[in-house]
Image (spheres, grey):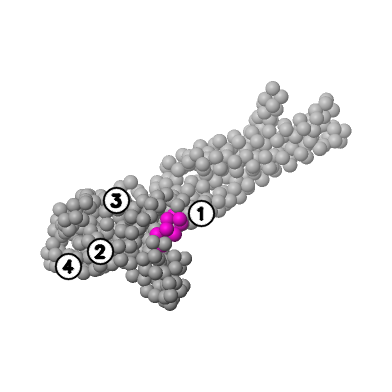
Amino acid sequence: MFLKELVTQGWQSLMRNRLRSLLTMLGIVWGLASVVLLLAFGQGLGGSVSMAFNNVGHEVIVMWPGQTSLQAGGQRAGKNIQYEYADVQAIRDEVPLVKAVSAEIDRDFAYKVGSRVVSLSTRGVEMPYGQMRRLDLEDGRYFTDNDFSEHRRVVILGNHAARRVFQGAPSVGESVSIGGLDFEVIGTLRNKIQDSMYNGPDNEQAFVPFHLMRDLKDLKNPDEIVFQPASANMNKTALAAVREVVARRHHFDPKDEKATPNWDTVEGAEMMNAFSYGLQAVLGLIGMITLGVGGVGVMNIMLVSVTERTREIGLRKALGARRRHILIQFLLEALVLTFMGGIVGMGVAILLTWIIPPMPLYGELYKTVNHEGDIFLRASTSVMMISFSILSVVGIVSGFFPALKASRMDPVEALRYE
């Protein structure tokens, strides 16, 4: 009941100076709207960048052959490592921590349709590769087991690669000459926004069955080994187990990381998440400074209010009001002023996030129907909670010092104030 009376008195006091209160609230409205919009922008930008990075694959690790830097098994350091297809089979059979694994070969081929010839980087891959590397199709189908067992001449084209080869015409079901042999295009990838890659973006690539690639180029050994740990938090353990198998087969120290350099996208994703959180923290700090300016306005108005109501404070104390009563009263007045402005500010910010269209982050070549990769401003629950927390801090700080000044007034001196 006491708290309700104080809030009512605080509201009535603010309404006696409506214009002054309204102008003070405008600073809070603008400040909180800035906080929400900046946090929403940071969240949208971080989400788009993380999405583009993670499009390289779903928690995959890519391992290349390197050169030994440690002596092992009586062999000198500096030995060149060359993977064998049997290494992939051994990983598949002996490492239960690996959920999926694929050999990979990468070579350039001339693609001929009619009189037009286009050079494309072509990857020979195995069945699990598409799921691991997020080869999502826009048209057609992915490879089947029969494509591999029967050595069918089939190819999947990246989105931009298909445009280059067929000049924008439909490509699925069409025939294309690769290295002098006729292939059927069975699928095209969706337009893929990709910030992280090796050997070029998937949009510009073509994909054929691994064993068929070996026949075309008379190749036996994979250039890379791509695998996926059973879970993201087992990435380092799985990598160590894979390196142990390969080291045993090629007679080098499994601790020799230079013998098998790798790219762990799980660690990369963690770094991107840290970047996203850091960006939101910086933008939130900028917004907090803007909101702090509005808080200074609230503090200034409350100090003026304390001065104007000095005799009222003295009278209340003379009638028995304690220091904490005065402190709470003026603090609540500041909080009422702050939160009223905050409610309006949140409403304005939410309205603006729906009015402002998606902001393109990537070029025209990556435009999609659903604006994938664009920056969307959305006032999510987390953004609103952070904004409310910042508003609470600003309101308490802005109201505390004027309220403390009022509570410390001497009642005799206050009653004498003219």
Residue that mark 3 sits on: 136
* Residue range highlighted in magenta: 235-243
Q: Amino acid at mark 4?
A: Gly
Quarter holding residue 296 = top right
Q: CA distance from mark 4 to mark 1?
A: 45 Å
Residue that mark 4 sits on: 179
Amino acid of disc 3: Asp
Q: Mark 2 falls on what kind of element? A: strand
Give the residue type at disc 1: Ala
Q: Kindly report the secondary structure that dominates the magenta region of the rendered protein.
A: helix
Residue 15 vertical position relative to residue 363 in the rendered view, above or below: above
Residue 193, image x, y percentages: 35, 55
x then y, percent, for residue 6: 70, 27
Nearer to us in this view, 9 or 118: 118
Quick check: can you spot residue 23? no
Q: Residue furthest left?
A: 114
Q: Residues within 10 Å of mark 4 (few under 14, many from 20)?
A: some
Please state which amino acid type lies under the numbered disc 2. Answer: Thr
Which residue in the structure is indicated by mark 2? 122
Residue drawn at 45 percent across, 74 percent down: 71
